[in-house]
Image (cartoon, rainbow, N blue to C red):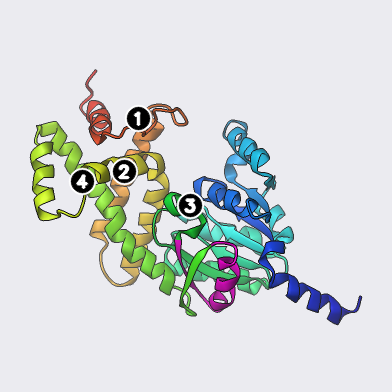
Amino acid sequence: MSQGSTKTTALKHMKNPTGWKVGLVGYGEVGRILAEDLRAQGVAVSAYDIKLDNSASAAPLHAHAAQHGVQLASSSAALAPESDFIVSAVTASQTVLVAQACAPALKPGAYFLDFNSASPNAKQRAASLIDGAGGRYVEGAVMTSVPPHRIKVPLLLGGAFAAELAPLINSLGFAAKVASDKLGVASATKMCRSVMIKGLEAMVIESFTTARHYGVEDAVIASLYETFPGIDWEKQAAYFFQRVIEHGRRRSEEVREVAETVRDAGLTPWSASGTAERQAWVADGADLCWFGEKGSPEFARSANWRVEADRMLKHVNKKD
């Protein structure tokens, strides 16, 4: 086959996403959801996660991969040369490191979708690595919680290849829209939203747990219902407590990126910095098993946020 024919075949392949080999860097909650939805369509998926390097944390990932037909890779670098489309879905602090690991081994012309909740500056640094290695970097900003929506979670794309990638991945079930051909716009939208959303999580946990200590939670919630009647505060509080207990470490890293975004705008990130500390504090409590052993059925599963607040108060007040 001539060089021209090989190039034509490669181009046709890249325009047919169902024939892609998809590589997932990050096989946590988001990665596993994407893997399930892509494999349900017959798309080939491989994945790598740092937890695979530890035998204890690797076991459930191996079980999930076997159940859904996902091939597990030994590293990000090992996954890259076989992937037509890479999705980086790791914690915010790993954003640039994943791009560094994948770049030298990228398949020429491969798309690299950065799903991570990182600052515009971090996305731009990752893009320079991927594009410099012959890949096609696209920043992605996930605009709400993934589990309810799964692969159809609202997703903003940015960068020179965003308009090119959007219809391709939407044919696989994604719900992507192009925010801008300029890097940083999509992630700035996400970061500014997170000042509010992650901040609200932290404020509810701090307010409601303190109210529980003083026995005034019912009065506080009644007042909130009067001020914001469109919000079911009991249900929302239960959801916030559960999500932060389970994912507070990842959330705290994201909000530290939010703080950097605020700082880059010339403002002191007082709110974002406090939110990051509260999220990390809850994550520390989860690591110390305040809320039950991770992986157990009762871990962060109470529909009553008061149960989790009482667990927090027990430990901070050193009660038996």
Give residue 181's position: percent from left, percent from top.
49, 80
Give residue 220's position: percent from left, percent from top.
10, 43
3 or 4: tag closer to the N-terminus = 3
Q: Is residue 53 visible?
A: no
Residue that badge 2 annotates:
239
Kindly indicate whether the residue at mark 4 contacts the one at mark 3 (C-beta within 8 angstroms): no
Mark closer to the observer (1, 2): 2
Q: Residues within 10 Å of mark 2 (few under 14, many from 20)?
A: some
4 or 2: tag closer to the N-terminus = 4
- Front residue of 43 and 127: 43
Mark closer to the observer (1, 4): 4
Extent of the magenta region: 154-173
Mark closer to the observer (3, 1): 1
Give residue 17's position: percent from left, percent from top.
66, 66
Kindly indicate whether the residue at mark 1 contacts the one at mark 3 (C-beta within 8 angstroms): no
Q: Is residue 279 left or right of residue 104?
A: left
